Amino acid sequence: MSHEVTPQTLWTGDYYNEGSGKDGLFDKLKEECGVFGVYGHPDAASLSYYGLHALQHRGEESAGMCVSDREEFHYHRGMGLVKEVFDKDMMASLTGDISIGHVRYSTSGDSKLTNAQPLVFKYRDGDLAVATNGNIVNAPQIRRELEEGGSIFQTTSDTEVIAHLIARSSKDLVSAAKDAFNRIVGGYAFLIMTNDRLLVASDPHGLRPLTMGKLGEAYIFASETCALETIGAELIRDIEPGELLILDKDGLHEDRFEEKKHRKSLCAMEYIYFARPDSDMNGSNQHAARKRMGSRMAIESFVDADIVTGVPDSSISAAIGYAEQTGIPYEMGLIKNKYTGRTFIQPSQELREQGVKMKLSAVRRVVEGQRVVMIDDSIVRGTTSRRIVNLLREAGAVEVHVRITSPPFKNPCFYGIDTPDRRELIASSKSVEEICREINADSLAFLSPEGLITAIAGNNADDYKGGLCLACFDNDYPTHLDFNGEEKFGCSC
């Protein structure tokens, strides 16, 4: 019989990331989610724990895991970090050799326990568990159709739609899953588990990352390669767009739910910000790619200065690249406090402006009297950039020049990134000069789309097999592009 243990307190301030969201001290884009799967390993739960811990940066609101011993499910979900949700006793109860796990930041559905994944259901052939990274754009329409047909939804998460589509089908599991994937529109990476099978799928454009590895005879699946490295698994390959893998007692079966029509088009924000620096995507290491972004930024928008500093942590690699290209020394001018949580209080606006210092500090002895180049990965509303520029000025910087290693973020994303309304995106309504004044900088420049493409491709531009979705960044690039800048297919965003 399936069972679940839930926390006694959910909204009393007891977990790390309670209250995170659009009103936080920083207006960074939120990581989507992270998924991790194991098939055929006796310590599936332990491997999933360490894998999810490696993916913690992709979602800090909730964590969950479902494990099968091929007869019944054992699962647990909770609000907060992986280390808070799972203790020693809980891990001991999660027995089996098949597992799927999830860390979540809510891009669709409320931030509450009922929406924590994996979602677990009973259906005609036994138990069904679903975990996904991404977003289903047409989930509201499908949900209305299913509810009119008698379906009762337990969550507000769009992920539940796929479970209902599978459960209502009269076909076998694989055929039902294919039909369900052909009905939904979005950017997603799915792990679907029954008592004795695991299905793995990527959306037709490959917008959300998903990799496959092996540990002995066991198969491992993860949103990023850093999770494979953590458990000592060998990377085999990325899951291809439109691909459906089936793992059962007979081994691994490679299938597709949609014929390959498009070139892979991974979300560019994975390279710029979301993924860990030690992860590889499409054969490109994230740290190396970000260094090239910084180097390209220096070529496109050099400014004479005394030191270069990066906004921790995602912009450090780019700042090193900028410094190496220009010969201007890289210095640790900003320090991040890692122990405050995303939002440790709910302050007034006045205190909120000061509260940034609880998470980020300028090193006065480094920046005082210096002309500073501040490297960051993106500007969303502009509030964070203004706060950090002012931090540097208060610490004595005589000039602050801001360089952003992505194009202007002008368009909301509906495919799995939590972005504000277009009216809140500062680049959608203001020019670069206006944004520069808004954030109180001496100068401001963004990396061009062409520069971003070149930086990510590196030396592999001619034979690089991947592509990018740049639709969120610049109105001049409303399509998916390959690395020669040629339009390959219309943007699905």
Image (cartoon, grey):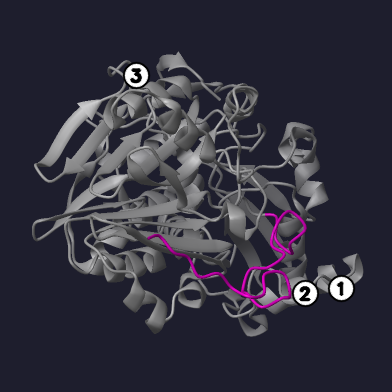
Q: Residue at x 32, y 15 (%)?
A: 261
In the picture, the quarter occupied by the N terminus is bottom left
Q: Is residue 420 above or below residue 473?
A: below
Q: Quadrant of residue 343?
A: bottom right
Q: Position of residue 187 (x, y in %)?
A: 47, 33
Residue 7 in magenta? yes
Amino acid type of disc 3?
His
Give, as a single range, the part of the protein colored magenta. 1-27
| Discs 2/1, front | 2
Residue 233 in magenta? no
Mark 2 falls on what kind of element?
Answer: loop
Q: Position of residue 317 (x, y in %)?
A: 43, 60
Residue 293 can be seen, yes or no: yes
Amino acid type of disc 1?
Leu
In the picture, the quarter occupied by the C terminus is top right
**Horizontal arrangement in the rendering, residue 127 relative to residue 98 (left or right):** right
Q: Nearer the viewer, residue 311 or 252?
A: 252
Res. 345 mark: 2
Amino acid type of disc 2?
Ile
**Horizontal arrangement in the rendering, residue 25 relative to residue 335 (left or right):** right
Residue highlighted by disc 3: 262
Q: Position of residue 395 (x, y in %)?
A: 73, 77
| Marks 3/2: CA–CA distance | 46 Å
Q: Residue at x 63, y 37 (%)?
A: 408
Q: Nearer the viewer, residue 221 or 86?
A: 86
Mark 1 falls on what kind of element?
Answer: helix
Pointer 3 or 1: first along the chain: 3
| Marks 2/1: CA–CA distance | 10 Å
Res. 8 mark: none
Residue 319 can be seen, yes or no: no
Residue highlighted by disc 1: 351
